[in-house]
C-alpha cells in the first residue's frame, strides 16, 4: 500500500473538508469513514452558512465563523472548478424572525453587544414588520420583526458533502468505508490506527469522528467533551420560489424544497423524530409564513448535532502525541471554508491559523457553565 | 384520448362523471382517480416541479407520489389513493405549485 501522510478519522463534513484541504497542500490522505449505521450529522443538517448571533458568549467564535463565511465564495468556486458540482451557495443575507417585542429587544441587545465587542465591524439591522414584509412576501401577522445581516447565506449541504468527497478524491485522498476505529497507537514514524477490520499507518492523524471523537481523543490525551444534541427537520414539497432569503428556521432550496427545522433535544443517541416536536416546528413555520399551511410535507428526520459542553468547536494538537489533531464542531457547513483553507494547512505542518487558540480543548479543564447554542 | 388500459368493470355497473382539465369523463364508480384517469386515456398527469419532466400514475399503491394532481382545488393529492366521486374536478399540475399568499389579518 502506498504510504500516506495523514489519516483522517471521519468522512463527514469536517473530515472531508480537512481531507480536501490536505490534498490541496499536496498531502496523501486516507479517510476512514464510518459504516452506514453511524450517526451522520453531515447527512441531516440544515445548510445555513450563518454568522449572525454566533459567538455571543465567546466573541472569538464570531470572528472564526466570519473568517469562514468570507472564504466561502472561494471554496464554492474551487469545488465547482475541481468537481463540476454547484453546491448552490447563496449569500443574500439572512433573517432571524421575532414573534414578540421582547424577542426583538433581546435580539437587538445581543447583536449590538457582539458588534461592540468586535469593534463595530458586524453589519446587522433590526427590521419592523412592514419593512420585513416588503422583503419576505407571505410573512405572517404574528411576526413582529426580524434581525437581518448581509453576512448570512445558505448552501445545499448534501451537494457540499458530495463535492468535498469528490474534490478530496481528485486530490488523491482514499476513502475507506465501514471503518470503526478502535485505537490510535504510537508507532515507528508516527501512528497506527486500528479499526475492527484493519490497520493504517501515517505520521499524522486527524480525529474528526463527530460524536465518536470523545473516546478517541481521550486515547491521545485530548479533551473533546462532545455530546449528541438532536435537531428535527421537516421537508416540504417543492413549490414555486417565494422565499428569497434564508432564515434561521425556514429556508427554500434552489429546487423549491422548503426545509423547516428547529429543535434542541437532549435525548442521547436517538436520532428519531417525535410527533409533538414536529408539530411545534410546523406550527412555528405556519406562524412565520401562513401560506406554508397549503404545502404538503414529504419527509422528516432527526439528526444528532455534535455539541461540545460549551457549544463551540474544538481544534487541538495533542501534546502527548504530537501529530494527532482533534477537529470537531456542530457547524460543519458554515465552517467548511475555514476547515479547507485554514485548518488543513495547519494540520499539514503550517502555522496555526490566527484566532484558533481559544478553541483548544484545554478550556474544558476550567469549570464552565453549559451553554445553549445560539444562532 | 386512447387508453393503454382496459377495465374489467362489467357493462352496466354504476358510473360517475369527473372532470379532468375541464373535460367531462364518465368512469366506473369505485375506481381510484388514478385508475379512472388511466382508463380514460390520460398519460402524463403532471410535470415535475424542478425539471418539468412529464409524469403519470405509476405504483398505484400510494408510494411513488408520481400521480399527484389537483383535486377539487387542493393541489398535490395522490390520485391513486383517492376514490372518484361524482362531480369531482381534477386538474393536472405543471411545474412547481404556487402557494397563495393568505390575506393578512389585522396586525397581531
Image (cartoon, coloured by chain):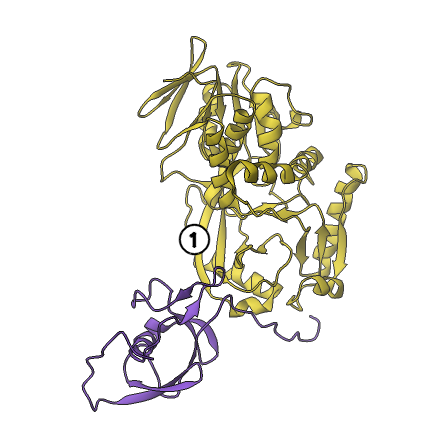
Rendering quarter of residue A103? bottom right
Say which chain is purple.
B
Vertically, is B11 above or below A148? below
Q: Which residue is mark 1?
A: A273
Out of A324 and A173, give the one closest to the viewer: A173
Vertically, is A191 above or below A83? above
- Judged from this view, the residue extending furthest toward the front is B2
* Number of residues whose C-alpha sits closer than 10 Å to that of mark 1, classed few (under 14), some (14–19) or many (20 or more): some
Residue sitting at 31 percent across and 77 percent down? Answer: B32
Asked whether residue A105 is in view, the answer is yes
Q: Position of residue A294 (x, y in %)?
A: 52, 70
Give the side of residue A255 with respect to residue A289, left or right. Answer: left
Out of A279 and A83, give the one closest to the viewer: A83
Out of A109 and A141, give the one closest to the viewer: A141
Q: Position of residue A288 (x, y in %)?
A: 62, 63
Rendering quarter of residue B34? bottom left
Q: What colour has chain A? A: yellow
State the quadrant of the N terminus of chain A: top left
- Judged from this view, the residue extending furthest toward the top is A188
Residue sitting at 72 percent across and 52 percent down? Answer: A148
Q: Position of residue A296 (x, y in %)?
A: 47, 66
- Judged from this view, the residue extending furthest toward the bottom is B12
Vertically, is A317 above or below A275? above
Vertically, is B7 above or below A200? below
Out of A319 and B85, give the one closest to the viewer: B85
Asked whether residue A332 is in view, the answer is no
**SS for callout 1:** loop
Q: Position of residue A282 (x, y in %)?
A: 52, 62
Amino acid at each position: 500500500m502506498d504510504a500516506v501522510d495523514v489519516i483522517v478519522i471521519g468522512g463527514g463534513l469536517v473530515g472531508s473538508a480537512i481531507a480536501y484541504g490536505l490534498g490541496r497542500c499536496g498531502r496523501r490522505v486516507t479517510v476512514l469513514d464510518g459504516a452506514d449505521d453511524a450517526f451522520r450529522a453531515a447527512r441531516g443538517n440544515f445548510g445555513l452558512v450563518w454568522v449572525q448571533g454566533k459567538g455571543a458568549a465567546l466573541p472569538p467564535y464570531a470572528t472564526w465563523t466570519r473568517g469562514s463565511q468570507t472564504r466561502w465564495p472561494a471554496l464554492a468556486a474551487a469545488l465547482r472548478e475541481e468537481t463540476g458540482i454547484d453546491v448552490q451557495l447563496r449569500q443574500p443575507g439572512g433573517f432571524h424572525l421575532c414573534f414578540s417585542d421582547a424577542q426583538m429587544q433581546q435580539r437587538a441587545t445581543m447583536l449590538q453587544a457582539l458588534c461592540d465587542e468586535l469593534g463595530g465591524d458586524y453589519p446587522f439591522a433590526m427590521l419592523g414588520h412592514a419593512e420585513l414584509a416588503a422583503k419576505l412576501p407571505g410573512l405572517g401577522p404574528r411576526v413582529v420583526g426580524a434581525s437581518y445581516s448581509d453576512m448570512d447565506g445558505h448552501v445545499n449541504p448534501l451537494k457540499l458533502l458530495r463535492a468535498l468527497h469528490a474534490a478530496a478524491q481528485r486530490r488523491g485522498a482514499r476513502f475507506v468505508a465501514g471503518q470503526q476505529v478502535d485505537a490510535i497507537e504510537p508507532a515507528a514514524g508516527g501512528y497506527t490506527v486500528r479499526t475492527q477490520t484493519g490497520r493504517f499507518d501515517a505520521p499524522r492523524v486527524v480525529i474528526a469522528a463527530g460524536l465518536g471523537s470523545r473516546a478517541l481523543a481521550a486515547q491521545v490525551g485530548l479533551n473533546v467533551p462532545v455530546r449528541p444534541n438532536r435537531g428535527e427537520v421537516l421537508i416540504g414539497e417543492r413549490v414555486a420560489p417565494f422565499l428569497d432569503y434564508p432564515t434561521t428556521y425556514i429556508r427554500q432550496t434552489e429546487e423549491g424544497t422548503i426545509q423547516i427545522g428547529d429543535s434542541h433535544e437532549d435525548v442521547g443517541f436517538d436520532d428519531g423524530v417525535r410527533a409533538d416536536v414536529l408539530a411545534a416546528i410546523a406550527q412555528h413555520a405556519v406562524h412565520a409564513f401562513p401560506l406554508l399551511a397549503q404545502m404538503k410535507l414529504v419527509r422528516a428526520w432527526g439528526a444528532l448535532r455534535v455539541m461540545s459542553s460549551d457549544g463551540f468547536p474544538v481544534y487541538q494538537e495533542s501534546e502527548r502525541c504530537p501529530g494527532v489533531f482533534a477537529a470537531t464542531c456542530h457547524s460543519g457547513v458554515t465552517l467548511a471554508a475555514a476547515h479547507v483553507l485554514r485548518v488543513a494547512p495547519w494540520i499539514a505542518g503550517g502555522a496555526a491559523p490566527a484566532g484558533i487558540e481559544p478553541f483548544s480543548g484545554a478550556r474544558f479543564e476550567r469549570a464552565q457553565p453549559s451553554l445553549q447554542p445560539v444562532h | 384520448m386512447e387508453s393503454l388500459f382496459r377495465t374489467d368493470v362489467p357493462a352496466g355497473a354504476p358510473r360517475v362523471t369527473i372532470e379532468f382539465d375541464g373535460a367531462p369523463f364518465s368512469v366506473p364508480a369505485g375506481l381510484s382517480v388514478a385508475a379512472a384517469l388511466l382508463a380514460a386515456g390520460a398519460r402524463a398527469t403532471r410535470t415535475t416541479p424542478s425539471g418539468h419532466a412529464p409524469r403519470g400514475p405509476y405504483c398505484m399503491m400510494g408510494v411513488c407520489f408520481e400521480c399527484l394532481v389537483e383535486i377539487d382545488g387542493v393541489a398535490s393529492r395522490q390520485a391513486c389513493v383517492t376514490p372518484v366521486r361524482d362531480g369531482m374536478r381534477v386538474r393536472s399540475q405543471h411545474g412547481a405549485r404556487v402557494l397563495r399568499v393568505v390575506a393578512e389579518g389585522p396586525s397581531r
